[in-house]
Amino acid sequence: MSELVVKNKEVVVPGEVLATGMDYLPGQGSYREGDNIHASILGLVNVDGRAIKLIPLSGRYLPKRGDTIIGKVIDVMMSGWRVELNCAYSAMLPLMGTSEYIMKGADLTKYFDLGDFMVAKITNVTSQKLVDLSTKGPGLRKLSGGRIMEVNTHKVPRIIGKQGSMVSMIKQATDCKIIVGQNGLVWILGEPDNELLAVKTIQKIEKESHVSGLTDKIKEFLEKETGKKLEVNVNGE
């Protein structure tokens, strides 16, 4: 007889038994050993029909084509800029990847200098993990001022929320501009006290990402902190 040993959205550790019997199937982050399905990673249980998947709770970012990231310039070369991605791999922003026409021989530090942060899109990732970036497109640019914070990349979808609902609520409550990179870097710009509240809120989401009804809890927290009445669609969250 088959039995699901764990609950949906429960946090499990590697080796932990998730289900017994043959009615359930191992998905991402789990494996079968005899009649049992075990966790292969630290993660959050996601039961999808008969399949048991785990959402990772730890691990570094792996670049993917189409991701919007926040990166830091670590080298200025003749052909463009080398950018740190908050992972084991760096990326290249070529001159042709910018939204501006740059003349040959121009001083590239006038566009992006060492230590500058940018919002960019990953346009290509080779099998050798050579990564190309572009700053062509809405919202892609150099970031000025504000602060950068790092979060667990696996918590980014929770911080953004369904259709951007969670991050929109933080923006509404704090009057901060906020950009969440899929590589786990977040840019926040606002009044100092409001920036600190945004950081505190994002850290709370990161810590409690596995809790059900999280959007309601964050809404209540922000309303208490700011005294504002927040209007946010929390259906399905």
Image (cartoon, rainbow, N blue to C red):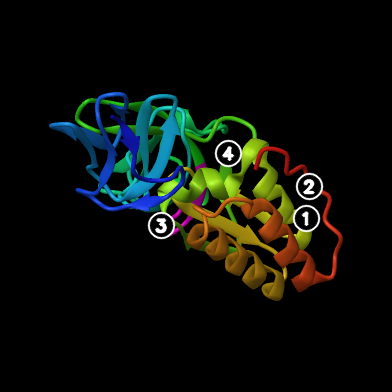
| Residue beneath the point at 66% across and 35% down | 163
Residue 168 location (% of width, % of height) = 71, 48
**Marked residue nearer the N-terminal end (3 or 4):** 3
Q: CA distance from mark 1 to mark 4?
A: 22 Å
Answer left or right for 59 relative to 145.
Answer: left
- Crowding around mark 2 (Cα neighbors within 10 Å: few <14, some 14 to 19, many 20+) is some
Nearer to me, 176 or 22: 22
Return the mark for residue 232.
Answer: 2
Residue 15 location (% of width, % of height) = 19, 48
Q: Which residue is mark 3?
A: 114
Q: Secondary structure at mark 2?
A: loop
Q: Are marks 3 and 1 in contact (CB under 8 Å)?
A: no
**Marked residue nearer the N-terminal end (3 or 1):** 3
What amino acid does circle 1 point to? Gln
> Is residue 115 highlighted in magenta?
yes
| Residue beneath the point at 30% across and 31% down | 2
Residue 113 visible in the shown view: yes
Residue 209 location (% of width, % of height) = 51, 54
**Marked residue nearer the N-terminal end (4 or 2):** 4
Q: CA distance from mark 4 to mark 2?
A: 26 Å
Q: Which residue is mark 4?
A: 140
Q: Which residue is mark 1?
A: 172
Residue 19 location (% of width, % of height) = 29, 37
Q: Which quadrant of the figure contains the N terminus?
A: top left
| Residue beneath the point at 38% across and 52% down | 11
What is the magenta range? 113-119
- Quadrant of the rendered structure where residue 36 is? top left
Q: Are marks 2 and 3 in contact (CB under 8 Å)?
A: no
**Marked residue nearer the N-terminal end (2 or 3):** 3
